[in-house]
Image (cartoon, rainbow, N blue to C red):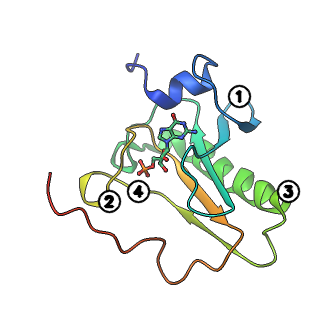
Amino acid sequence: MSEDTLFSRIVAGEIPADIVFQDDRVTAFRDINPQAPTHILIIPNKIIATVNDVTKADEATLGHMFVVARDLAEQEGIASDGYRLLVNCGHHANQEVLHLHMHLVGGKPLGRMLSTKVRESS
Ligand code: 5GP
């Protein structure tokens, strides 16, 4: 079995988080450092480190993440104005937590990109 991640510990209830949705396949919780009025992370309960580690067996779970994102956007009241779904993969994308996660960001105009900040080193 994969080693625990920060996010798998949130799934297990070992680390507190503001969980807004959970079922047998995915968990969604508010980002600790929100970049917009709504900033929710939607993750597979199963540890998948990055998009590079996705397999065909994960298709149903990954599709479910989009359905959950759609429902949460509706619940948050941001569906009609629009929102951004974003998945970082690896070093060049500054993926911080090696447990695949979809950011659901909205509640204000987001511009063309969420951030143009570029980390110079490491
Ligand atoms: P990444 O850069 O990997 O795509 O995004 C990781 C996200 O996880 C960041 O937006 C960061 O604020 C969030 N995050 C990091 N640690 C925690 C935590 O302990 N709890 C919650 N709720 N979010 C976290």
CB within 8 Å, label 3 to label 1: no
CB within 8 Å, label 4 to label 2: yes
Q: Is residue 119 above or below residue 91?
A: below
Q: Is residue 59 above or below residue 92?
A: above
Residue 93 — which label? 2
Residue drawn at x 37%, y 38% as measured from the top left: 98
Q: CA distance from mark 3 to mark 1?
A: 20 Å
Residue drawn at x 14%, y 51% as measured from the top left: 122
Residue indicated by mark 4: 88
- Which residue type carries mark 1? Asp
- Which residue type carries mark 4? Asn
In terms of sequence position, does the residue under pointer 2 or pointer 3 come before the other?
3
Q: For residue 37, which quarter of the picture?
A: bottom right
- Which residue type carries mark 3? Gln
Q: CA distance from mark 4 to mark 2?
A: 5 Å
In terms of sequence position, does the residue under pointer 4 or pointer 2 come before the other?
4
Q: CA distance from mark 3 to mark 4?
A: 24 Å
Classify mark 4: residues with Cα within 10 Å, few (<14), some (14-19) or many (20+).
Answer: some
Residue indicated by mark 1: 24
